[in-house]
Image (cartoon, rainbow, N blue to C red):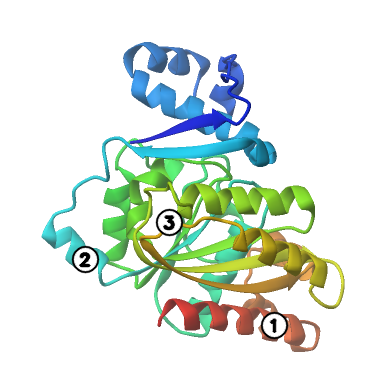
Amino acid sequence: MIELIYNFKKEKKMKTKIDYKKMAIKNNLSESKIRKMEKQEPEKFRLLIEVENAGKKAKEEEDIVFDIVDIDGEEEIDSETKKILNNVKLYAMFSLKGGSGKSTLGDMLASYIRDIEKEEVVILNLDNGQIASDINSCETIDYVTIEDKFSVLEILVRLAKKYKHIIIDTPGELSEEFLAIIHLVKNFILPFNPGMRNLKTAITTLKVYVGENSKFLEGKINLYIVLNNYQNDIIPIDEVKKLNKAIQDIEFNSDLELNIKYTGVKFSKTIKTIEGHKKSINDLYKENPGAYSNPRKKANIMCEKFLEMFNK
């Protein structure tokens, strides 16, 4: 379990007014179950409160110092489980903001691995707020539909026995499920949309997960940052400059060997077509080569670059 302690620069204590109804809706639980958890499972309840506060304060990250403390550490993994997980490639789509394009990019990467690389791939969706299997073109497991039967680690191991690649789609907040397995992941994609607020959230995400006080990850970490949904024909240079400057100012965890690259995805109506028909860009190209030749080429080049970095 991970505890997040927020220290305000102005030395103000954070007062939390608990909205049980809102917490229940956000976590896909009943209000009575939330109240019961507060009494019977105080540690789990506290984590939900901290996750809620992380989301509320993301847009004010310049006023907060994050101190991240590892309380219990990761679940111990036996040698047989390690052997199984060593044979699978894990990729995580992550951001502390919903609607940044994590699910779309994850499905795009999965379709490239399936259609172009011709290898077995599955998406593990940890966002309890959406049933991604209703939208994705690739095989998707929605953890919310099976969480009563298996832990997220157990599901990961089961999938690793069948698939060569697992893409983990995460919610736009700190989630207990993701934190339980994040130490197993070495390859990450962080998308963010244009705009100062979205940029700040992207930087906050980096500080929380790979900042100097973070205890989530260790060793070599590959990170692709994606400027998503820009409007012009070229990536806005001002956005890139702001991103570079902000990243240079981050104090990263010195125990990490962090490899960072950047790319961009222009806004396209093709994305809506993909999601509306549950078809990959490669499926659409087969049906109408003339209309989808260029979008397919760009999407596949981007995914090729992802794997080129991740497979080194």
Residue 259 pos. (x, y %)? 48, 72
Depth check: give the residue in front, 101 or 280.
101
Element under label 3? Answer: loop
Where, by quadrant of the figure, is residue 129 drawn?
top right
Three-letter code, disc 3 = Asn
Q: Are marks 1 and 3 in contact (CB under 8 Å)?
A: no
Residue 262 pos. (x, y %)? 63, 73
Near mark 1 (Cα within 10 A), the count class, few <14, some 14-19 or many ≥20, is few
Residue occupied by mark 2: 84
CA–CA distance in space, label 1 to label 3: 34 Å
Depth check: give the residue in front, 109 or 240.
240
Q: Residue furthest right?
A: 232
Give above or below for 182 relative to 4. Answer: below
Tell me the quarter of the image containing the C terminus.
bottom left
Residue 253: numbered disc: 3
Depth check: give the residue in front, 176 or 33.
176
| Badge nearest the viewer, 2 or 3 | 3
| Badge nearest the viewer, 1 or 3 | 3
Residue 298: numbered disc: 1
CA–CA distance in space, label 1 to label 2: 34 Å
Residue 311 pos. (x, y %)? 41, 80
Residue 125 visible in rendering: no
Decide if residue 256 is on the left or right side of residue 295.
Answer: left
Which residue occupies 49% across, 83% down? 308
Near mark 3 (Cα within 10 A), the count class, few <14, some 14-19 or many ≥20, is some
Q: Residue furthest front?
A: 10
Which of disc 3 and disc 2 is earlier in sequence? Answer: 2
CA–CA distance in space, label 2 to label 3: 28 Å
Residue 3 visible in rendering: yes
Element under label 1? Answer: helix
